[in-house]
Image: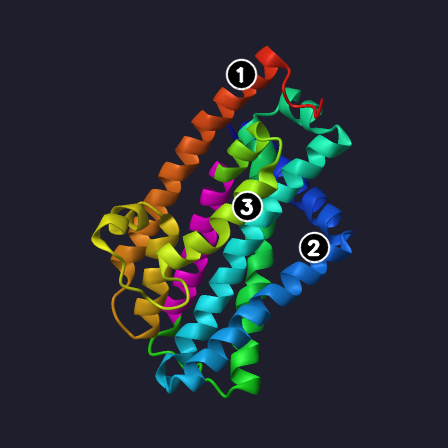
Amino acid sequence: MKTDLRRVVRLLAVGVRTYLKYQASSGMWIVFTTLTPVVYAMIAFYLLRAGDRPDQLVHATAGAGIMGVWTSVLFGSGATVQRMRWMGVLEPVVIAPAPLLLTLLPVTLVYAIVGLYSISATLVLGGLLFQVPLAFAATVPVLLSFLVCLVSMGMMGLLLTSTFVHLRNAHALNNTLDHPIWLLSGMLVPIALPIWLRPVADVLPTTWGARALHTSIDGGSAWGSMAMALLLGAVYLGLAAVALKYVEHKARAKAMLALS
């Protein structure tokens, strides 16, 4: 049991290191992940100031950070799988002895780790340039909420990664899911949704993660929202495992991973 656990940890560590080095060699990826959360934050700051809502600036700071995390996870996961296909290494990854779930999990972990920069950048930007007060009522729940957001987005990204393996053009799905998810989740500021959209938002772990974050910033109790975000994240992880087994079976049966 200890040997198996050690192998899993080693596989994840090697995967994270490999994907991180690979992505760090892409100038476009570095610029994208560096500038996206900053741009989100600046737009939110100026809109709230123009609307005479200075009390919401701290929410904009945190919300822009997790928006950057979501964008990083979504586009990064899709782009990584797509590049694997272009370079002809997706088939070896799928047929490797290691479970496909553990092979692709480091992809989303890398982008969740990079998301720490998104959060840090927006906090620094808000504090230094816009004098946003960052003295939270309860610091520990806020930090835990950030961590829950990272974990839940990573699990959601893993489920999406399973569909990217099956899709030949993952970028189309990326463009479709970016803005709707952070709007439905209320990442920037909590929003009032029509009744028919609320069930859709309630099954997203990002919704509960963002809700926990905004609630904890206001000093409220966010433990229930955190628990719900982690529960849904675990459900998404289970769905990802099932989806990857299905995708792997279809790929082996029809030899459909290559571009041609």
Instruction: Where is residue 214? Give x, y as percent.
Output: 34, 68
Amino acid under disc 2 = Trp
Q: Which residues are magenta?
A: 140-159
Residue 237 highlighted magenta (yes or no) = no
Tell me if I can see residue 8 in this picture: no
Look at the picture and state if 58 lies above or below 148. Answer: below
Q: Quadrant of the C terminus?
A: top right
Q: Identify the residue under disc 2.
A: 29
Q: Identify the residue under disc 3.
A: 174
> If you read the primary sequence from the N terminus, does the residue marked by circle 1 or circle 3 appear first?
3
Who's the residue at 67% across and 27% down the image? 93
Amino acid under disc 1 = His
Amino acid under disc 3 = Asn
Report, in whole angstroms, how far the alpha carbon at label 3 lies from the one at label 2: 15 Å
Q: What kind of element bears circle 2?
A: helix
Q: What kind of element bears circle 1?
A: helix
Instruction: Where is residue 50? Give x, y as percent.
Output: 43, 85
Q: Identify the residue under disc 1.
A: 249
151 displayed left or right of 106: left
Q: Nearer the viewer, residue 258 or 231?
A: 258
Tell me if I can see residue 70 in this picture: yes
Q: Residue furthest top?
A: 253
Q: Nearer the viewer, residue 228 or 10?
A: 228
